[in-house]
Image (tube, rainbow, N blue to C red):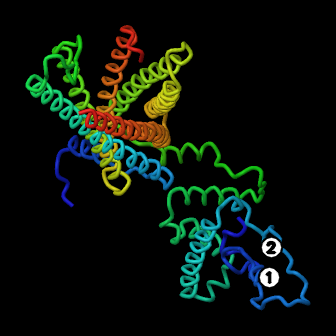
Amino acid sequence: MGALTVGEPADEDNKRPSGIPPRASEKRRVSLRPPGKSDPPPERRDPTPTHAVPPGLGHMSTTARQRLELALDVDSAELEVDDEGDDDEVREEAPVDQAPRRRERTKTPMGLKNMTTSARHRLELAVEHDDDDVFDPKKPPTLPKERLSDVDLRIGTIPFDDEGQKIIRSLAGWIGFCGVITLGIGALTGLSYVTGEGSVAHVVVGILATAISFWQLMAVWSLRKVITERRQQHHMVHALGHIRSALLLKALLVCAAMVLGCFTFSIAGSLLFLLG
Amino acid sequence: MADSGTRPERYVRMAKTRSLSRIPFDPREERVVAGLARWMGLLGRFQIVASVFIFVVLLAVTGIVTTVEVIEPATNGAGEEPLVSVGEVSREAIGAVVAVVVLFSLLFLRGGMLLLSASDDLDTVVNTDELDQHHLEGALRRLKSYFVLESLLMVAISVGLYYATAAGWGL
């Protein structure tokens, strides 16, 4: 399992629980002294990491990797405290038996309980991929299908009852109806420019109405998936995102209409005042 | 802990607790929901302000026309043109237009209030860890009511556009 197991045979480079050899960090130290004129220009740092990246962790962000290292440090410290209290003879007699026990403890490290669900998910992916000891940067690690179904059931399901499903179905229907009417109005308004009766403003209104109706129909599509498929949370967030886009555009339109209305009425009031 | 209630009641309570559970949104999903709540609240406030604006404009126009109609006979000379000429539009037609505008602004106001309530529910979903599903269902219910009103408005606008086009008003 590479860098994530604590109880492996002691190696000089693998003493740290994170698996990053201490020599690598020594090499990275940069002198704070400013370079003199006779000194050659400093070489650019090689972008490839100097230490061996544990397989499966290459796609993790720096923050996630640091959190993982911290969690493993906490866990290894806990294990060392437990080991100090044991009998030395027992430790010498059965060093091989302790390795499985340590691995068993490592499966539920204490430093990981405060991680978010997505971070823990990524950590599970990385650990699982480390078992294979094969890392291809072009192919990010994936969960096997049997575990993927468990994760989906655990993470993505919102247990809507009958009333909730009825609300979602009704909401999808009304949003779809509204979207179809908006699409019709937008198309007719935009096409009035083609027939010669409309102006550029009609085209703009037609395009905006078509965009709003497009997002509304996409939201209907996602809401239908909330009812019919298992990953309700994923589809619900998608639907809410589409509704957000439609409402954003509508808010801008209402704001523009209010500004135009204020401008028109102020002009009309000024003309009436001047003529009166 | 004492187990109160019969077995079916416990099952009902468990089902309710499960249905009112927390939804584990990740940070990206929380941003989407928070963005929806923010824009929903903004659109609701815009709609409320716009409906009040329509009311104020309607009142202003009504007041001006009434004032002109009252003042005009007293100041109008024998051969002068009237300041405001309604033309061939009857008072019933003007009353119908005013009624439609008032109804439109009331629907607009109600839609804005529904959007504000739904926005508050979604804010509660994002900012708290309890009863997420309950608040989400409340937000969806209010959103559905909003889209019912929106559909009515869209149908009315479609009918109005059709008659305006048929009457040849140049729209």
Disc 1 residue type (three-letter): Lys
State left or right for residue B61 relative to residue A161.
left
- The relative height of residue B36 versus residue A227 in the rendered view (above or below) is below
Three-letter residue code for mark 2 = Thr
Locate residue A102 relative to residue A222 in the image: left or right.
right
Is residue B128 among what the camera can see?
yes
Q: Looking at the rendering, which quadrant does residue B49 occupy?
A: top left
Instruction: Please state the horizontal and vertical placement of residue B158, each as a whole percent of the image.
Output: 37, 18
The quarter in which the N terminus of chain A is drawn is bottom right
Q: In which quadrant will I find the C terminus of chain A?
A: top left
Residue sitting nearer the eye, A44 or A188 = A188
- Whether tag 2 and tag 1 are in contact, CB under 8 A, the answer is yes
Q: CA distance from mark 2 to mark 1?
A: 8 Å
Regarding residue A228, the answer to whether it shows in the image is: no
Tag 2 and tag 1 share a subunit: yes
Dividing the picture into quarters, in which one does residue B84 lie?
Answer: top left
Q: Secondary structure at mark 2?
A: loop
Pick the residue in front: B5 or B12: B12
Question: Taking A192 as reference, is A50 above or below it?
Answer: below
Q: Can you say whether A74 is above or below A251 in the image?
A: below
What subunit carries mark 2?
A
Mark 2 or mark 1: name the one nearer the start of the chain: 1
Quadrant in the picture for residue B103? top left
x and y percent of residue B109 in the render? 25, 36
The residue beneath circle 2 is A50
Name which residue lies at 62% across and 71% down: A66
Per the image, label 1 sits on a secondary structure element best described as helix
Q: In the rendering, at what x and y percent does residue B165 appear? A: 40, 12
Residue at x 32%, y 54% (from the top left corner): B130
Residue to which mark 1 is pinned? A27
